[in-house]
Image (tube, rainbow, N blue to C red):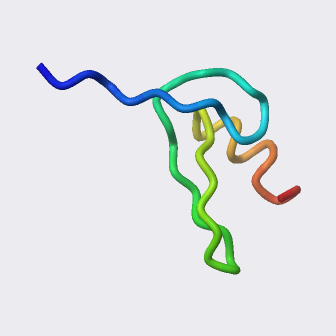
């Protein structure tokens, strides 16, 4: 079975399976959850 990939959240630092977010300038950020993305996504 494939191991679930985990990343350190680009914002809050938690290590979880990623929720990918691509910013308007094409940079890719990996957040730990959609909630974290919604909370911090605009700040990046």
Residue 3 shown left or right of residue 39 in the figure: left
In the displayed structure image, the side of residue 17 where residue 36 appears, left or right: right
Query: Would you place residue 29 above or below residue 10 in this image?
Result: below
Q: Is residue 3 above or below residue 21?
A: above
Residue 2's spot in the image, x, y percent?
18, 25
The C terminus is located in which quarter? Answer: bottom right
From the viewer's side, name the closer residue of 42 and 10.
10
Q: Out of 33 and 27, give the one closest to the viewer.
A: 27
Give percent across and percent down for residue 3. Answer: 26, 22
Quarter-of-image position of residue 7 = top right
Residue 6: image location, x then y, percent:
46, 27
User: Which of these two is toward me, 6 or 35?
Assistant: 6
| Residue beneath the point at 68% across and 77% down | 24
Question: Going by the picture, which residue comes out furthest to the bottom?
Answer: 25
Task: Give the residue at x 59% y 62%.
Answer: 28
Point 78% across, 30% down: residue: 12
Q: How many marks?
A: 0
Spot the residue most to the left. Answer: 1
> Does residue 15 sit above or below 8 in this rendering?
above
Q: Residue furthest right?
A: 43
């Amino acid at each position: 079975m494939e191991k679930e990939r985990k990343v350190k959240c680009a914002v809050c630092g938690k290590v979880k399976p990623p929720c990918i977010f691509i910013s308007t300038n094409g940079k890719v950020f990996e957040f730990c959850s959609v909630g974290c993305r919604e909370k911090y996504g605009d700040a990046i």
